[in-house]
Image (cartoon, helix red, strand yellow):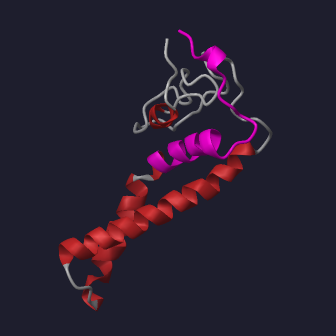
């Protein structure tokens, strides 16, 4: 079996150690709150490597939200045209709506990015990359 590419594991929300087990058991968008697995179902890695580890994911989520707000604002400007005082509510509702719509994405991928790219304690182990 060949090695799973890191970018594929990040996009699919897989474990950073084995790149097989899922970080989240359910779908991204549902009426139930998102829950994260405590351990990888494939290699048994504990995802919260230390108490309060995922507080750092708030910084990643903040960066994602900032980038999304800039992109949504620019797209709104390009679609709507020149911004005037009367258009402030259009921009306000578009930005707030986009932020709320992308909140589940930010929650999930801030943790995925934290584990895969910003965690020195969690490393890929090719031993676990077997079916």
Nearer to me, 106 or 112: 112
What residue sits 28% from the left and 68% below the top?
75
Tell me: residue 22, above or below residue 115: above
Residue 126 forms part of the magenta stretch: yes
Across and down, in percent, residue 90 comes to 28, 75
What residue sits 26% from the left and 76% below the top?
77
Across and down, in percent, residue 49 comes to 76, 35
Q: Is residue 93 visible?
A: no
**Horizontal side, residue 22 vs residue 105: left or right:** right
Tell me: residue 57, above or below residue 115: below
Across and down, in percent, residue 31 comes to 42, 38
Q: Is residue 125 visible?
A: yes
Q: Quadrant of residue 62?
A: bottom right
**Horizontal side, residue 75 vs residue 112: left or right:** left
Residue 45 forms part of the magenta stretch: no
Magenta-drawn segment? 105-131
Total number of numbered discs in the rendering:
0
**Furthest-bottom residue in view?**
85
**Furthest-right residue in view?**
51
């Amino acid at each position: 079996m060949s090695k799973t590419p890191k970018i594929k594991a990040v996009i699919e929300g897989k474990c950073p150690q084995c790149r097989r087990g899922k970080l989240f058991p359910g779908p991204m968008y549902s009426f139930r709150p998102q829950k994260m697995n405590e351990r990888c179902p494939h290699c048994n890695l504990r995802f919260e490597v230390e108490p309060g580890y995922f507080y750092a994911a708030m910084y990643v989520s903040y960066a994602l939200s900032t980038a999304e707000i800039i992109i949504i604002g620019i797209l709104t400007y390009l679609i709507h045209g020149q911004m005037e005082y009367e258009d402030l509510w259009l921009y306000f509702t578009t930005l707030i709506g986009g932020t709320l719509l992308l909140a589940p994405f930010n929650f999930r991928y801030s943790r995925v990015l934290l584990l895969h790219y910003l965690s020195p304690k969690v490393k890929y182990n090719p031993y676990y990359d077997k079916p």
